[in-house]
Image (cartoon, helix red, strand yellow):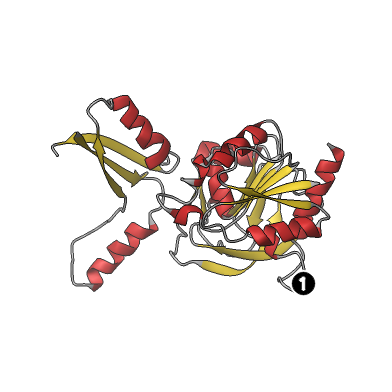
């Protein structure tokens, strides 16, 4: 399994995402924002950070990076793509996922270990979890409030496209406590919390996040 | 060359915590009578004469604003 991990100027979590891929017995393939090809990878992780300094809007400039044109094309053909935090914002700006992420409702940057409920365990990235499993992974974001119009929310809810929901107090004002969503095909997933920081109890709160990368392994092996 | 102004504002139904924070600060600073504040972005573009309105609208809609959460207006002003 070869998994591309994109680095934009301002990306922070590419190294941890690469490490998570290796923990799941995958080969992490670094991709640069200026690349015009995906180097034959089986899947792509768009990691967290502050691409292009979050100028204009989070993800608004990264969306137009050369490598993202390749990611958009591959995702539309069914390649598994995971966007974490800033990566989720980028996938939303790129219209691979609906809605948008806005400033946290209480304006504070939130940095804490966060319980999530797995609402959909049929996506390319979540098959290793039991439905309604609760997992503990870090959340660290200032603009993590998920917003979409009512029609979009209804479509997400009616079709099981909410993948993760915050458990307990809503940390950022996300509508319907949404922490992560998927596209109609289930190959593209975006979430604000950081599974790649929770793959080993030595360095994270749990190893609950590793399941996402192991799920991908299953998806790629089956394909 | 012409100057073009693009104003981008959060949609009315989208929570604007930054605007609310400004509104909440005003009474503390002794400014009374301001009942609401919404915060947006203001862009000033220097534009060649052959750039048409459709192109400007496309710039605003696809890049300067995110229509999921923001409304935008484009207007040409005297430079």
A91 w.r.t. A172: above or below? above
Residue A175, horizontal then vertical, whole percent: 53, 51
Q: Residue at x 64, y 48 (%)?
A: A31
Question: Crowding at label 1, few (<14), some or many (≥20) Cα neighbours within 10 Å?
Answer: few
Q: Position of residue B24 (x, y in %)?
A: 30, 66
Circle 1 marks a residue in which chain?
A
Residue located farthest toward the left when viewing the structure as drawn? B78
Residue at image coords 55%, 39%: A66
Q: Is residue A141 above or below residue B8?
A: below
In the displayed structure, would residue B10 be above or below residue A198? above
Which one is nearer the viewer's eye here, A177 or B19? B19
Q: Quadrant of residue B70?
A: top left
Q: How many marks?
A: 1
Residue A217 percent location from the top left of the image = 82, 48
Whether residue A52 is visible? yes
Q: Secondary structure at mark 1?
A: loop
Residue A93 seen from this side:
no
> Is residue A163 or residue B50 the one in the foreground?
B50
Residue pictured at 80% horizontal, 49% vertical: A215
Task: Please state, as top left, top right, bottom left or bottom right, where the C terminus of chain A lies in the image.
Answer: top right
User: Who's the residue at 52% across and 42% down the image?
Assistant: A65
Q: Please give the residue where the numbered disc 1 appears in the rendered image.
A: A201
Q: Is residue B69 left or right of residue A198?
A: left
Q: Is residue B26 left or right of residue A100?
A: left
Report which quarter residue B18 is drawn in.
bottom left
* Residue B38 screen position, x and y as percent: 30, 53
């Amino acid at each position: 399994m070869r998994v591309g991990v994109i680095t934009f100027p301002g990306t922070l979590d590419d190294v941890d995402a690469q490490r998570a891929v290796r923990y799941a017995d995958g080969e992490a393939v670094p991709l640069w924002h200026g690349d015009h090809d995906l180097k034959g990878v089986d899947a792509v992780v768009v990691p967290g950070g502050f691409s292009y300094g979050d100028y204009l809007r989070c993800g608004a400039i990264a969306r137009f990076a050369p490598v993202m044109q390749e990611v958009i094309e591959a995702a539309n053909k069914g390649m598994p793509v995971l966007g974490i935090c800033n990566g989720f914002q980028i996938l939303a700006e790129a219209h691979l996922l609906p809605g948008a992420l806005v400033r946290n409702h209480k304006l504070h940057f939130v940095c804490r270990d966060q319980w999530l409920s797995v609402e959909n365990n049929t996506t390319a990235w979540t098959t290793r979890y039991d439905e309604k499993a609760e997992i503990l992974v870090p959340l660290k974001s200032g603009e993590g409030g998920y917003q979409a119009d009512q029609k979009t929310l209804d479509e997400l809810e009616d079709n099981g496209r909410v993948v993760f929901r915050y458990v307990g107090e809503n940390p950022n004002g996300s509508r319907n406590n949404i922490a992560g969503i998927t596209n109609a095909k289930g190959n593209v997933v975006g979430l604000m919390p950081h599974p790649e920081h929770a793959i080993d109890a030595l360095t994270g709160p749990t190893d609950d996040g590793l399941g996402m990368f192991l799920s991908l392994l299953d998806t790629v092996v089956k394909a | 060359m012409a100057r073009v102004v693009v104003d981008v504002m959060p949609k009315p139904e989208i929570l604007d915590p930054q605007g609310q924070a400004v509104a909440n600060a005003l009474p503390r600073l002794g400014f009374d009578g301001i009942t609401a504040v919404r915060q947006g972005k203001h862009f000033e573009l220097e534009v060649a004469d052959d750039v048409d309105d459709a192109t400007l609208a496309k710039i605003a809609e696809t890049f300067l604003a995110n229509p999921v959460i923001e409304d935008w207006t484009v207007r040409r002003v005297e430079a």
